[in-house]
Amino acid sequence: MQVLQKLAEHTEAEASRRLAERLKLLDADEKRLEQIRSYLADYSGGSQGSSPAMTISALRSNRGFMERLRNAVDEQRGNVEIQRHQAEQHAAQWRAARARSLALERLGERIEQRERERRDRLEQLRLDEITHQAKA
């Protein structure tokens, strides 16, 4: 039983480690998304007040850059959703591993309790026998 408990604890710890790694990746991707959104907001705000003397080439370049930033936001949003979904899967795996670990722990405790009760009954039988022999 102890071997099963140790294996379940190891599985739970490994699931916990994988979940922590996935949450770090999700956090990093969310920060990257916010950074790209910030660049887009900053650049959008700065380009609205652009000078009327801007050349057509500069305007095209500006629009192209803005489009690339918007595409980067969309792509990063997709990455965040993928990471979030994977984090949810890892969390479910950890919860399942934790539940197995706790179930095996409780089973081990019940087995130990039954063994103690069995030993106590045997001891009581021995004491009753000794008492019965002393009276005879």
Image (tube, rainbow, N blue to C red):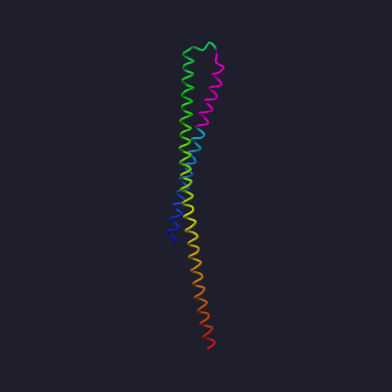
Q: Tell me where residue 70 appears, x and y as whole percent.
A: 48, 26
Residue placed at 48% from the left, 12% from the top? Answer: 56
Residue occupying the far bottom of the picture: 136
> Could you tell me which quadrant the N terminus lies in?
bottom left
Residue placed at 54% from the left, 27% from the top? Answer: 38
- Count up the numbered dots: 0
Work out whether 19 lies above or below 69: below
Q: Tell me where residue 52 appears, x and y as whole percent.
A: 54, 12
Dividing the picture into quadrants, the one containing residue 131 is bottom right
Residue 58 is inside the magenta segment: no
Work out whether 30 lies above or below 65: below
Q: Main secondary structure of the magenta part?
A: helix
Work out whether 37 lies above or below 56: below
Residue segment shown in magenta: 33-51
Q: Tell me where residue 78 appears, x and y as whole percent.
A: 46, 33
Residue placed at 43% from the left, 55% from the top? Answer: 7
Q: Tell me where residue 93 appears, x and y as whole percent.
A: 46, 48
Residue 34 is inside the magenta segment: yes
